[in-house]
Amino acid sequence: MAFNHRIKITALLRTAPEQQDITVMGWVRTFRSNRFIALNDGSTISNLQVVVDFENTDEALLRRITTGACLRVAGKLVASTGSGQTVEVHATQIDILGDSDPEKFPLQPKKHSLEFLREIAHLRPRTQTFGAVYRLRNTLAAATHEFFQGRGFVYWHSPIITASDAEGAGEMFRVTTLPMDGTAPRLEDGSIDYREDFFGKATNLTVSGQLEGELGAMALSEIYTFGPTFRAENSNTARHLAEFWMIEPEMAFYDLEDNMNLAEDYIRYLIEAAMSRNADDLAFLDQRLQEEEKALPQDKRSDMGLKDKLQFVIDNKFERITYTEAIDILLNSTPYKKKKFQYEVAWGIDLQSEHERYLVEKHFKKPVIVTGYPAAIKAFYMRMNDGCEPGRETVAAMDILAPGIGEIVGGSQREERLDKLLARMDAMGIPAHEMEWFLDTRRFGACPHSGFGLGFERMVQFVTGMTNIRDVIPFARTPKNCEF
RNA sequence: UCCUCCUUAGCUCAGUUGGUUAGAGCAUCUGACUGUUAAUCAGAGGGUCGUUGGUUCAAGUCCAACAGGGGGAGCCA
C-alpha cells in the first residue's frame, strides 16, 4: 500500500470539520501541556493543532513528541474550542516517523537571530520565516515562467560552461579537469597548456547567459533564460552571491522603451502573484518586519509596511528618468549641497550606492528606471545613442533601481550595427576574433533587439523584505562559505 | 579587497576604573499542573569567556596577530 495517503495541512485548514477521519504528516513545532501539538508540513505557514488524549496514551510515546520530531497523525477533524484556530485534529493514532533529540535539536520555539539560522541553513526551512521566504521564492519562479510563457517567449537554456571570457561581467570560476598539484601540462613559456584540458581550451562557469540569449532571440523572436550564474568576485555584501539565479529575456524587434515596458510589467506580475497566492506568508513577514523595526530609532524605520510597499509598486508607474536628469537631481539635492555624499557627482561618473539610494528612497520613493548612461561606463554590446554631443556619448541602457535593494534590473537595447559594435569592442579591448559567433547575428539579418537581466534573489528580497540576500536562497555561496 | 563593530551556557544577552566562586531570560532535565497558543509554577544540570601570543601580582575586561560573523563601501544582478 502506498505510504502517502495524507491530506496537506494547507488543505485541511480550509476543510469544514465534520468529525471526518484524516491522516496528516509533518514536523512538531511545539508540544504544549502534554496535550497540544503544533504540527507543520511546510504547505502553509499555519500550524495544525493536534490534540492528544494524553491520559489514554502511552507515556513512552508522549516523551517522543518533541520539537523537530516527524509524526504521522490519524484522527478526526473537529471544530476547535480554543481561540487560536478554527479547526483541530483529535488524534486517534500517532506514529513517530522520526525522533528528534530535544537536547541536540537546535531550533527552539522562540526567536532566533537570522545570523544563527544562517549557520544551520539545513534546518532553517523548518522555521516560519524561512518557510514563508521559500514558498514565496517558489511562487516568483513559477510566475516567471507563466509571465513569459503567456507572452509566447521561448524558455532558452544558455550554457553553464563557457569558453568566452569576453562577457565582461566579472571574475569567473575556472572549470578544468587538469590536475592542480603542479603536474598539469605546460607550454614552453611555462603557462598551462589548455589544449590538454577537457574542452581543449580554458573554460569557466558562465557569468551571464545574455550573449547566447541574443542568438536565440535572433531566431525565435522572444526568449528568456532562467538559470544559475556564477561570479568569483570577492564581494562581501548583503546583496551579492557567488552563485545566484538570473532571468534574462532577450527580444527581437524591441527598442529600449519596449524593453522597459516589459520589465515593468514583469515585476508587477511577480508582485501580484506573490500577493494573491502567498497572502498569509506576506502577512507574517510584514508583521515580522514591523516588530524588527520597533527596535530601530524612529528615523530608521520605513514609512510603509511590506504589503503596503508592494501594493504601492503595483499601483504606481515606475519613474523614468535619464542619466543626465539623475545627475541634475543629485547636483541640486540637499545631501550634495551639504557635502554629505562620499563620492563626487558629475556627468560621466557611475552612480554610487549612495546616489541610487537618494534617488529611489528619498527623492522619488518608488522604483526608478534610469536610461541613457554614458557609453564609457557601460558594456560593449549596448546600443550607441544617435545625435549625442561629442564627449557626451550615451548608450540605450536602462537600470531599474528598487528601494532598499538597489539595482534589480540591468538591460539595454543591443547594438545591432556591425561597424559600430566592432568599433566599440576595439575601443574597450574586447577580442572580436573570439566572438565571431556573436558577431554573426549582426552579419546575417540583424534587427533592433533588446533584453535585460533580473537578479532573482534581489527580486525575492524585494518581495519578502529580507535585508540579506543570503536569507532568500536555500544555500548561499559567498566568499569563504560553501557549507551544505 | 577596504572601513567599522562584534565573538561570554544550546539560543539571546548582562558582566562597573583589570580584583576573590562569571550571571539572567529562554531552551534542556526532574517534579507539579492540565483547553494550551513561544502554556504556567518549583527545583536541577549546563562555561577552556573565538584562537594564539603578550602586558600585569592579577585578564572575560588592556594590547597584538589570526579565525569567524554583522553593518557599510567597491565590484554587480
Image (cartoon, coloured by chain):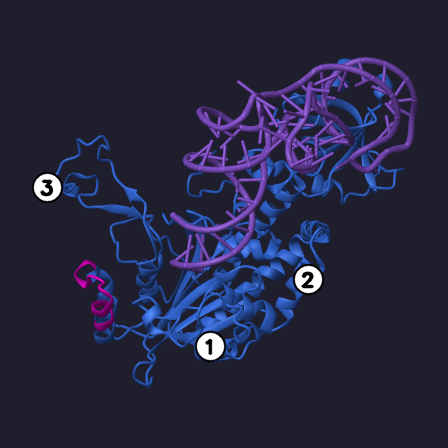
Chain colours: A blue, B purple
- Magenta highlight on residue A427: yes
Residue ID for mark 3: A187
Q: Which residues are magenta?
A: A423-434
Front-most of residues A54 and A459: A459
Say which amino acid is labelled 2.
Answer: Asp
The kind of residue on which mark 3 rests is Leu
* Residue on which disc 1 sits: A327
The chain containing the residue under callout 2 comes to A
- Label placed on residue A299: 2
Q: CA distance from mark 3 to mark 2?
A: 62 Å
Q: Quadrant of residue A451?
A: bottom left
The residue tagged with tag 1: helix, strand or loop? helix
Instruction: Tell which of A417 and A370 is nearer to you.
Output: A370
**x and y percent of residue A45 in the render?**
69, 43
**A253 vs B37: above or below:** below
Q: Earlier in the sequence, mark 3 or mark 2?
A: 3
- The residue sitting at 76% across, 22% down in the picture is A93
Membership of A71 in magenta stretch: no
Quadrant showing the N terminus of chain A? top right
Residue at 59% x, 37% y: name it: A116
